[in-house]
Image (cartoon, grey):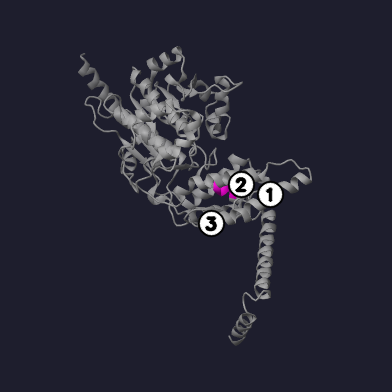
């Protein structure tokens, strides 16, 4: 059979393959497997495609830990309990760690591992990235831009490659109010950015970062846009997909409700409020950020990779499929989100808290700064000093308040602005899921109950981030009730003192109080 005949036959076979059949026997490479989305991705691939080949995980060398120890560390979370119970030993059987580093040339792979990936891998999920907003431009570029280039160079040599899916972010074009599902130009070429990063003195990196960013709020968003340019350039050489999740938060229900392993985004703020550590935040309460459940994003990623692999094997395409994994109409405002969280925290409070959970929003920096000092920093200093005095070991609250302030300021660009994300390509993929795969990969979220989702997200955060003991709930509710009364008494006392001072120093004339009393007497 000639080459055309082989390709035509392959196109026919792939065009009629289900998602599970597509992954059957195929080896997959996942970068960023130790991260939040990476863990959910490998769990879903193994559980829903049990006949998948090896899932090669690019893992860094950690002092004192070999690759097998790193795998055990990845699997030692509640997320994997479902598959461990259903199919014991399957995760360990499918995962194949390769020692490497995204910040190194050739990904820091040995010749043996590099050759193995070239010969055997047919699907690449490039998930790894530095997500720190305050990362120096040199480090962010090396990781997010040059790292992507190295992944692409590896993929171009893979003899069995069917698709490379690159995970970007919906906010990489945050300087635009309306973000379509297409690749936008970047203010600087990715080659120039890498060249600057490779030759830039590390000590100068932080100094030049602000100038390098231009209109972009942080190094994360800019470097993720630059990485998209690399993927776009290779659109005629290898089958590629750009996948842009918005703010990824707790799982909806697959495999468990409310699973999360980090404090990023609104969940971190919610937990800090629940502990009574944060009482005010800088942001517009009416702004509607875009949130997406992690399991919804992962299902759609897998569907997107499958769909790209089966489309147009013969003719080269002159575009990159781009998917904005954004919830759009299902997202809620900052105020609604925190209100939902606070209601849940009142029903399921922490058994350890500093004060009554509450939150205020403000877009006035001076008010935010002053309130932070009075309501958060001063109490932190007091508690640290008091616990030091009685000799009780504790995590110091003042450094924590400093971190919270830095993070709040870094996020302020996003908590005071709103964007419109097109997601028609993303939603359109739902209709392309084969009927046989509906149960495992359907990610239609139009009927999701936001209140129930946020309740599960809040409870899940307590459970998976703080290991909250449910048997202590009665005590926690009593503690919350005590803080509520203490808060009311303190506010009443403070208001009384304030009124007394105002009248005592004649800031408000005594006739004002007399007139108020006369008014109520006449009603």
Secondary structure under the numbered disc 3 in the rendered image: helix
Q: Nearer the viewer, mark 2 or mark 3?
A: 3
Secondary structure under the numbered disc 2 in the rendered image: helix
Residue drawn 38% across and 38% down?
Answer: 244
Across and down, in percent, residue 61 comes to 54, 21
Q: How crowded is mark 1: few (under 14 residues within 10 Å), some or many (20 or more)?
A: some
Question: Which residue is disc 2 drawn over?
Answer: 401
Question: Which residue is disc 1 drawn over?
Answer: 381
Q: Residues within 10 Å of mark 2 (few under 14, many from 20)?
A: some
Contact, mark 3 vs mark 1 (Cβ under 8 Å): no
Rounded to the nearest whole Å, what is the CA distance between mark 3 and mark 1? 21 Å
Asked whether residue 486 is in view, the answer is: yes
- The part of the chain drawn in magenta is 268-272
Question: Which residue is disc 3 drawn over?
Answer: 366
Across and down, in percent, residue 275 comes to 63, 49
314, above or below 209, in the image: above
Rounded to the nearest whole Å, what is the CA distance between mark 1 and mark 2? 10 Å
């Amino acid at each position: 059979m000639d080459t055309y005949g082989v390709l035509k036959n392959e196109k026919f076979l792939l065009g009629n393959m289900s998602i599970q059949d597509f992954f059957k026997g195929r080896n997959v490479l996942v970068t960023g497997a130790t991260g939040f989305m990476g863990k959910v991705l490998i769990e879903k691939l193994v559980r829903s495609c049990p006949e998948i080949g090896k899932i090669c995980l690019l893992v860094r060398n950690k002092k004192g830990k070999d690759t097998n120890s790193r795998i055990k560390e990845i699997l030692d979370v509640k997320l994997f309990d479902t598959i461990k119970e259903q199919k014991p030993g399957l995760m360990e059987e499918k995962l194949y760690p390769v020692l490497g580093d995204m910040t190194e040339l050739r990904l820091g792979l040995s010749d043996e591992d590099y050759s193995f990936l070239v010969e055997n891998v047919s699907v690449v999920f490039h998930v790894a990235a530095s997500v720190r907003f305050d990362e120096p431009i040199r480090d962010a570029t090396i990781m997010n831009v040059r790292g992507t280039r190295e992944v692409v160079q590896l993929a171009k040599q893979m003899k069995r490659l069917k698709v490379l899916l690159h995970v970007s972010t919906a906010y990489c074009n945050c300087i635009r109010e309306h973000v379509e599902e297409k690749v936008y130009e970047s203010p600087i070429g990715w080659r120039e950015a890498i060249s600057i990063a490779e030759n830039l003195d590390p000590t100068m990196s932080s100094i030049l970062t602000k100038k390098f960013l231009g209109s972009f709020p942080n190094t994360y968003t800019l470097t993720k846009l630059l990485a998209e340019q690399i993927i776009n350039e290779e659109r005629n050489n290898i089958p590629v997909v750009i996948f842009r999740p918005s703010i990824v938060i707790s799982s909806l229900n697959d495999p468990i409700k409310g699973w999360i392993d980090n404090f990023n985004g609104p969940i971190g703020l919610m937990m800090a409020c629940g502990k009574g550590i944060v009482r005010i935040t800088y942001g517009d309460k009416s702004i509607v950020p875009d949130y997406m459940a992690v399991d919804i994003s992962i299902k759609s990623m897998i569907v997107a990779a499958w769909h790209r692999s089966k489309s147009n094997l013969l003719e080269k395409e002159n575009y990159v499929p781009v998917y904005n994994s954004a919830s759009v109409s299902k997202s809620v405002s900052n105020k609604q989100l925190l209100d939902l969280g606070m209601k849940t925290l009142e029903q399921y409070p922490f058994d350890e808290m500093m004060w009554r959970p509450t939150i205020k929003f403000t877009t006035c920096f001076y008010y935010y700064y002053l309130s932070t000092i009075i309501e958060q920093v001063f109490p932190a200093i007091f508690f640290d000093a008091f616990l030091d005095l009685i000799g009780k070991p504790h995590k110091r609250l003042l450094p924590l308040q400093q971190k919270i302030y830095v993070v709040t300021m870094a996020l302020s660009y996003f908590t005071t602005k709103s964007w419109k994300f097109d997601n028609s390509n993303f939603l359109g993929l739902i209709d392309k899921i084969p009927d046989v795969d509906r149960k495992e990969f359907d990610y239609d979220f139009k009927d999701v109950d936001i209140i129930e989702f946020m309740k599960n997200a809040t409870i899940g955060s307590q459970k998976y981030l703080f290991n909250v003991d449910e048997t202590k709930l009665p005590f926690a509710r009593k503690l919350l009730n005590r803080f509520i009364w203490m808060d009311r008494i303190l506010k009443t006392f403070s208001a009384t003192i304030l009124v007394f001072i105002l009248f005592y120093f004649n800031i408000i004339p005594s006739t004002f109080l007399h007139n108020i009393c006369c008014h109520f007497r006449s009603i």
